[in-house]
Amino acid sequence: MDANFALEVFDKAPYVTVSFVRTDGSPYGLPLSLVRTDEKTFYFHCAQEGEKLECIANNPKVFLSAVSRCKPTVGPKDGSFTLEYKSATAVGHAELVTDDAEKIEALRVVCQRFLPQHMSAFDASIARSLSRTAVVRITLSEPPIGKRKEYDKQGEEMKWGRME
C-alpha cells in the first residue's frame, strides 16, 4: 500500500512501537503515543532522562511500526484461518526538541489527539511542566510502507492497493 495509506494507519493506531538501538547495539522498542504533524514528522514526549534519550544520543535512527486494525477471521472463500489487518512501518531519525515554541506546539498536538476534551487545561499544564518535559521529533528518512489484508463484500481479497 502507498505512503498515504501507511500514514493513515499511523494516525489511527492507538500507539506506535518505536525501536531504538541501545549503546551496546541491542534493540530497544516500546509502544509510544506518537502524533504526526505532516507527511514525515512525528512527536512524542517523555521524561528528560532515560533509556530512550540515551539511545537517541548514541544512535538517532529509529524504526516505527503500527497496527490500526487486526481481526482474526475465517477466509470467506476457502475457510482458512487468517487475519485481516492494516499495518505500517517507517524508518526515521529522532532528535530532542530544544526550542520551547516547537515543544509547546508538539505537546498541543499530542493533547489534541489524546485528550481533546481537556484542552482548556493545556496552558496551565504547560506552565507547570514544560521545563521538566522532553519532546522528541522523529523525521522520516524515507516514505512509510503500508500493508493490509482485507476482503470485499464478495469475499475476494483486495490486493495490490485496491480500495473498496
Image (spheres, grey):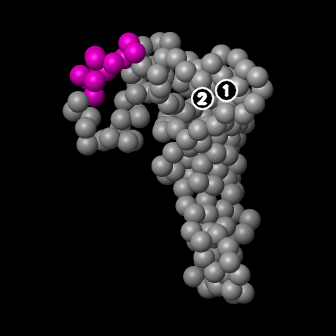
Q: Residue at x 42, y 19 (%)?
A: 133
Q: Is residue 154 visible?
A: yes
Between marks 1 and 2, how big is the CA–CA gap? 5 Å
Q: Residue at x 47, y 26 (%)?
A: 46
Tell me which numbered mark, 1 or 2, is placed earlier along the sequence: 1
Question: Which residue corresponds to mark 2?
Answer: 138
Q: Find residue 149 and report its horizontal and vertical position in percent.
A: 66, 67
**Do residues under tags 1 and 2 come within 8 Å of each other at their CB atoms?**
yes
Q: Find residue 28 and report its horizontal and vertical position in percent.
A: 67, 33
Q: Which mark is residue 148?
A: none
Q: Residue at x 26, y 35 (%)?
A: 119
Question: Which residue corresponds to mark 1?
Answer: 93
Where is residue 111, by image quadrant?
Answer: top left
In the displayed structure, 6 sits above or below 102; it is below
64 on left or right of 113? right
In the displayed structure, 106 sits above or below 72; it is above
The amino acid on which the numbered mark 1 sits, given as a three-letter code, is: His
Element carrying mark 2: strand
Segment colored magenta: 122-132
Dominant secondary structure (helix, strand or loop) of the stretch shown in magenta? helix
In the displayed structure, 13 sits above or below 126; it is below
| Badge count | 2
Element carrying mark 1: strand
Q: Quadrant of the C terminus?
A: bottom right
Q: Find residue 93 and report its horizontal and vertical position in percent.
A: 67, 26
The amino acid on which the numbered mark 2 sits, given as a three-letter code, is: Ile
Q: Quadrant of the N terminus?
A: bottom right
In the displayed structure, 33 sits above or below 164; it is above
